[in-house]
């Protein structure tokens, strides 16, 4: 969160303090000058005093400029640290703060760089573990599905097949998300009318409860994107909106705007919403609002994570916010070029 528009920067505060001090000192000398003049002095002495004051003012200006420049240089590491903290908060762990001095701020910068490096290694190890485990699970799941197909009991066979299909779906979603995030899967970019794609994806949800309505969509807009994967994003978001709607919820609303740089799609529901302190977690793997993880209240918690990786692979962004009354609005931004 940026505070520059609300709070003065530390450099402005230092500048104000130095100006106040300079004005106070200058005021004291002017008061002394007026006192001397009022007591009466010789013309030659008055000229010398005026030159003395002029020299003093020039000296004050030079001292002020030099001190201000020195303070700015000393406090540069604080500005760099602030940028580093913002980068890590946005998920960029490649940040490396340059160290140009040998003081406490240099030690703090080195500690920050070590922390960012460790965080990056930890997250990479976790992502690699997820991908490796998911990949290793595919073969035994396939074998189990073949074995279950040979069971004589039709009821047991169908029940086990349902569980295995659910497990296979979870593994595929996880692998897709991790491959997309790691850049191991290429997009099949095509010139696609994204508005038509939105209309097609929403059509299958209009008959369900609480329904879907389209508002303020442009007539048409052609973008370069992977239609299959963007279709996954829209359907996953709409499925979540329908799943977490209440009995008395209003229909899910889909709207969009286009500016000079991007196409923004908004999908707003009237459901149970997300706890305010967990909004940032909804795009994490396996996150679910329902901590009991009941099958009847949602999927595996991988859908939005996959959506984020797909949208970011297109150079866009996806965010979620709670509405003022009920439900959430999910925003998808895609670049025009």
Image: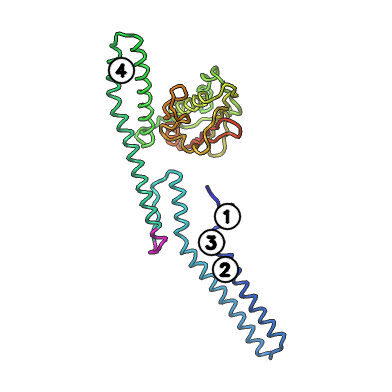
Q: Upstream in the sequence, badge 4 or badge 1?
A: 1
Identify the residue at horizontal 34%, vertical 12% (top origin): 156
Q: CA distance from mark 1 to mark 2?
A: 18 Å
Which of labels 4 and 3 is toward the front?
A: 4
Q: How is the image coloured?
A: rainbow
Q: Is residue 329 magenta?
A: no
- Is 15 in front, or is 291? 291
Q: Is residue 115 above or below residue 236?
A: below
Q: Is residue 94 left or right of residue 218?
A: left
Name the element at disc 1: loop
Q: Upstream in the sequence, badge 1 or badge 2?
A: 1
Q: Residues within 10 Å of mark 4 (few under 14, many from 20)?
A: some
- Is 191 in front, or is 313? 313
Residue 17: give x, y in percent of width and height. 58, 66
Q: CA distance from mark 2 to mark 4?
A: 77 Å
Identify the residue at horizontal 49%, vertical 66% (top origin): 71
| Residue 18 - label | 2
Residue 83: give x, y in percent of width and height. 46, 52
Name the element at disc 4: helix
User: Dot 4 corresponds to which residue?
Assistant: 145
Q: Upstream in the sequence, badge 2 or badge 4?
A: 2
Which of labels 1 and 3 is toward the front?
A: 1
Which segment is the magenta one? 100-107
Q: Is residue 104 magenta?
A: yes
Q: CA distance from mark 4 to mark 1?
A: 62 Å
Q: CA distance from mark 1 to mark 3?
A: 11 Å
Q: Upstream in the sequence, badge 2 or badge 3?
A: 3
User: Dot 1 corresponds to which residue?
Assistant: 7
Q: CA distance from mark 2 to mark 3?
A: 11 Å
Q: Upstream in the sequence, badge 4 or badge 3?
A: 3
């Amino acid at each position: 969160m940026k505070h520059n528009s609300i709070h003065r920067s530390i450099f402005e505060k230092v500048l104000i303090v130095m100006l106040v001090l300079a004005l106070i000192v200058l005021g004291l000398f002017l008061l002394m000058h007026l006192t001397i003049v009022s007591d009466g002095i010789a013309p030659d002495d008055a000229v010398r005093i005026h030159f003395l004051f002029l020299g003093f003012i020039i000296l004050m200006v030079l001292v002020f400029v030099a001190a201000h420049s020195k303070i700015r240089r000393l406090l540069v590491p604080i500005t760099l640290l602030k940028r580093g903290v913002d980068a890590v908060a946005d998920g960029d762990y490649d940040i490396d703060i340059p160290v140009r001095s040998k003081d406490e701020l240099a030690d703090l910068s080195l500690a920050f760089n070590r922390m960012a490096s460790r965080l990056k290694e930890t997250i990479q190890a976790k992502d690699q573990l997820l991908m490796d485990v998911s990949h290793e699970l595919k073969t035994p799941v396939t074998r189990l599905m073949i074995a279950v197909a040979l069971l004589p009991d039709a009821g047991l066979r169908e029940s086990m097949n349902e569980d295995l299909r659910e497990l296979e779906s979870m593994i595929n979603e996880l692998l897709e998300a991790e491959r997309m995030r790691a850049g191991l899967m290429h997009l099949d970019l095509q010139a696609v009318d994204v508005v038509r794609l939105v209309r097609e994806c929403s059509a299958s949800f209009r008959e369900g409860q609480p329904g879907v309505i389209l508002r303020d969509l442009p007539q048409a807009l052609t973008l370069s994107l992977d239609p299959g994967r963007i279709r996954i994003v829209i359907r996953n978001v709409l499925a979540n909106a329908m799943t977490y709607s209440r009995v008395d919820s209003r229909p899910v609303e889909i709207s969009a705007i286009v500016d000079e740089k991007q196409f923004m799609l908004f999908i707003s529901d009237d459901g149970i919403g997300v706890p305010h302190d967990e909004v940032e977690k909804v795009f994490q793997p396996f996150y679910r609002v329902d901590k009991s993880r009941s099958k009847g209240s949602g999927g595996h918690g991988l859908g939005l994570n996959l959506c984020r990786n797909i949208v970011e692979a297109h150079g866009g962004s996806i965010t979620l916010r709670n509405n003022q009354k009920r439900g959430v609005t999910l925003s998808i931004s895609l670049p025009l070029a």
